[in-house]
Image (tube, grey):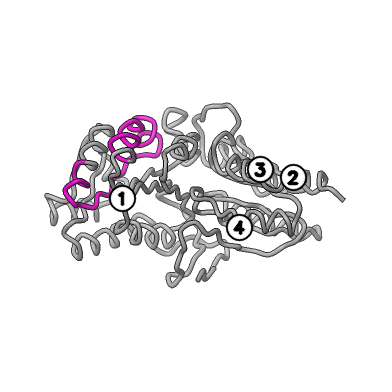
Amino acid sequence: MAKIIYNGEYEKKAITDQFVENLGGMLEKDPDVIYLDADLMFAFGAGLWDLGDKYPERVIRCGIAEANMVGTAAAMSVMGMKPIIHSFASFITRRAFDQIFLSGAYGRKTLNIIGSEPGYKQTYWGGTHMAFEDIAMMRTVPNAHIFDIVDGVQFNKLISKTVDMKGIYYYRTPLADNIAVYDEDTEFEIGKGIVMREGNDASIIACGRLVTISLQAAELLEEEGIHVRVVDMFTIKPLDEVLVLKCAQETGAIVTAENHSVYGGLGAAVAEFLGENDPTVVERIGTRDEFGEVGSETYLRERFGFTPEKIAERVKEAIAKKKD
């Protein structure tokens, strides 16, 4: 059951620290768990280096060789190990997609793939590092699961489950500055979205970094007498079609919000499903046929329309298109 603690404040413990603690527990409890990193161990801080010293054969630096890392992890899966692998979202998907698709999914292997700092979270690394297409790529992988993470509790609860499950699990997750959303006692059901806020005028179906921004947009709209439902669709594949249909039928207008391209991402998944089952007004917020660029997080959010004000405007546009 989801226990929501959202009040706009940041997590008391960084998601990186939460993950290192969780990984340490998994490594201690299960000798089959193994962690591979593509030269980005520094992203999780000193604690991960300490785990490398403690478990030198199960915390492995693979260098800037993402495709090789995925192939190695797939081979380890054959031997009964449970690999967790990490790189920036742009590199682990774009550079290693063939290995994920063939060595991993086609070969019926098990991989837990962490793609960190997706989309605008790369800020000053610029467009070369910004993954606005990773969800679209991973949606084409048969039977893969895709999660877009909002906070550390969600990330660590989910990966603690999937490390013991068969298949391909892709996590796109930020590494810093996360607003706390869920209580530590929350349990997450894979493939089931979470209604964060009720409303009947429209629904915002968001994922990842855009969830808390969408909640802020709903607060702005509430001041105008517009009551908006907000959903955290943290599992993008498989999509919670039951909840999407419920939102469409009860509110009559959908706005999707994602730190990703509208082509092939959450918005596409929602629009495709509704187009085939219950045509509904859908406005999609995301990047459109463009690359990322260098800038601060504040600048990039404004640049791509990822602000509470811009989302509120799109909600009003969606409501105006509703059928009487």
18 is higher (above) or lower (below) than 115: below
Specify the label residue 242 is tagged with: 4
**How far is mark 1 from mark 3, CA to CA?**
42 Å
Residue 160 place in picture, x, y as percent: 33, 61
Which of the two marks, 2 or 1, is nearer to us in this view? 2
Query: Circles 2 and 3: CB distance less than 8 Å?
Result: no
Q: In terms of secondary structure, where does tag 3 sit?
A: helix
Left or right of 180, for residue 114: left
Residue 20 place in picture, x, y as percent: 28, 57
The magenta span reads 75-104
Of residues 124 and 53, which is closer to you in this image?
Answer: 53
Query: Of the residues shown, which amino acid type is indicated by label 4?
Result: Val
Q: In terms of secondary structure, where does tag 1 sit?
A: helix
Query: Of the residues shown, which amino acid type is indicated by label 3?
Result: Glu
Compare marks 2 and 1 and give the one earlier in the sequence: 1
Compare marks 4 and 3 and give the one earlier in the sequence: 4
Q: In terms of secondary structure, where does tag 2 sit?
A: strand
Compare marks 2 and 3 and give the one earlier in the sequence: 3
Which of the two marks, 4 or 1, is nearer to us in this view? 4
Q: In terms of secondary structure, where does tag 4 sit?
A: helix
Compare marks 1 and 3 and give the one earlier in the sequence: 1
Specify the label residue 44 is tagged with: 1
Mark 2 = which residue?
Answer: 281
Query: Of the residues shown, which amino acid type is indicated by label 1?
Result: Phe
Mark 3 = which residue?
Answer: 276
**How far is mark 2 from mark 3, CA to CA?**
13 Å
Question: Residue 38 occupies which quadrant of the picture?
Answer: top left
Residue at the image position 23 percent from the left and 49 percent from the top: 35
